[in-house]
Image: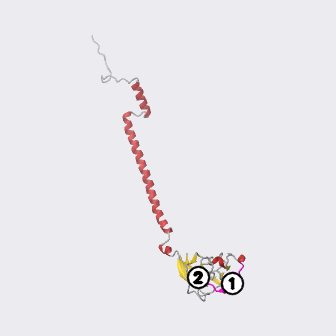
């Protein structure tokens, strides 16, 4: 009586595990890839590369838009801080003072501020020069506030140094204060014939702007 030998599975021969150098190479490759089969590594690496590129793009785009936004905000601010065309046009002015007689003064405008130009009399020069400078609140001599050889020409901003009011005394018939110079009626500041503060709340003398005579009768302010 014959016997039949049973077999398990599909009848295919089992695949034997590789041995020797081949097995070592496969094990090393599996370890380097974190246990991911070789056929799946390409897919995973590709997904990672796409993810990195996507993150880089989002980062670059965000930084770029932020930079454009900052520039858009900064441009109006820079424009506002820049001097306007009319201010630049009045950076300096030239005034012919030939018609201003001794003892007279005029009021003009420079950089949108009033300017007093005064032709001092010999008596006014003497009065200003004999003052004890050490006793002044803002010590300056008349020579400090005028040009050599042109001590009779006193040029100052017509702005009280207390709160920015425009003092009286530049126009004919206006009150000149107790010291014969300028008087600010708003808070009672009195300036002498050299436009130095002598009484009242103003802390300093009327400001002398930068100026120079470009001829005997023409002065450039600014």
Closer to the camera, 141 or 72?
141
Location of residue 139 (image quadrant): bottom right
Q: Can residue 63 be seen in this snapshot? A: yes
The quarter in which the C terminus is drawn is: bottom right
Closer to the camera, 82 or 102?
102
The residue that label 2 is drawn on is 117
Instruction: Locate residue 68, reporting x and y percent.
Output: 44, 59
Classify residue 221 as left or right of residue 55.
right
Location of residue 44 (image quadrant): top left
Q: Residue at point 44% right, 51% down?
A: 59
- Residue 127 badge: 1
Q: Residue at point 48% right, 67% down?
A: 79
Q: Is residue 173 above or below residue 196?
A: below
The secondary element bearing badge 1 is classed as helix
Q: Which residues are magenta?
A: 115-132
Classify residue 39 as left or right of residue 179.
left
Q: Is residue 107 above or below residue 43?
A: below
Q: Residue at point 47% right, 66% down?
A: 76
Q: Is residue 166 above or below residue 1?
A: below
The quarter in which the N terminus is drawn is: top left
Whole-angstrom CA distance, mark 2 to mark 1, is 18 Å
Location of residue 167 (image quadrant): bottom right
**How many numbered discs?**
2
Query: Which of the two discs, 2 and 1, labels the residue nearer the N terminus?
Result: 2
Q: Can residue 188 be seen in this snapshot? A: no
Q: Residues within 10 Å of mark 2 (few under 14, many from 20)?
A: many
Colouring chosen for the image of the structure = secondary structure
Classify residue 50 as left or right of residue 167.
left
- Report if residue 125 lies within the magenta region: yes
- Report if residue 92 lies within the magenta region: no
Q: Residue at point 69% right, 84% down?
A: 127
């Amino acid at each position: 009586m014959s016997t039949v030998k049973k077999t398990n599975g599909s009848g295919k021969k089992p695949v034997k595990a590789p041995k020797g150098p081949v097995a070592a190479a496969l094990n090393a490759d599996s370890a380097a890839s974190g246990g991911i089969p070789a056929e799946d590594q390409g897919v995973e690496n590709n997904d990672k590369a796409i993810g990195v590129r996507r993150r880089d793009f989002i980062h670059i785009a965000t930084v770029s838009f932020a930079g454009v936004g900052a520039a858009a905000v900064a441009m109006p601010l820079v424009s506002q801080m820049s001097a306007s065309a009319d201010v630049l046009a009045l950076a300096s002015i030239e005034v012919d003072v030939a018609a201003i007689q001794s003892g007279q003064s005029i009021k003009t405008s420079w950089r949108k501020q009033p300017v007093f130009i005064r032709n001092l009399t010999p008596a006014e020069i003497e009065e200003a020069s004999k003052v004890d400078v050490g006793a002044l609140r803002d010590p300056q001599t008349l020579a400090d506030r005028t040009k050599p050889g042109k001590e009779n020409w006193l040029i100052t901003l017509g702005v009280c140094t207390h709160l920015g009011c425009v003092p009286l005394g530049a126009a004919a018939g206006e009150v000149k204060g107790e010291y014969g110079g300028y008087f600010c009626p708003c808070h009672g500041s009195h300036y002498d014939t050299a436009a130095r503060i002598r009484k009242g709340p103003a802390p300093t003398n009327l400001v002398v702007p930068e100026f120079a005579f470009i001829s005997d009768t023409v002065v450039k302010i600014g």
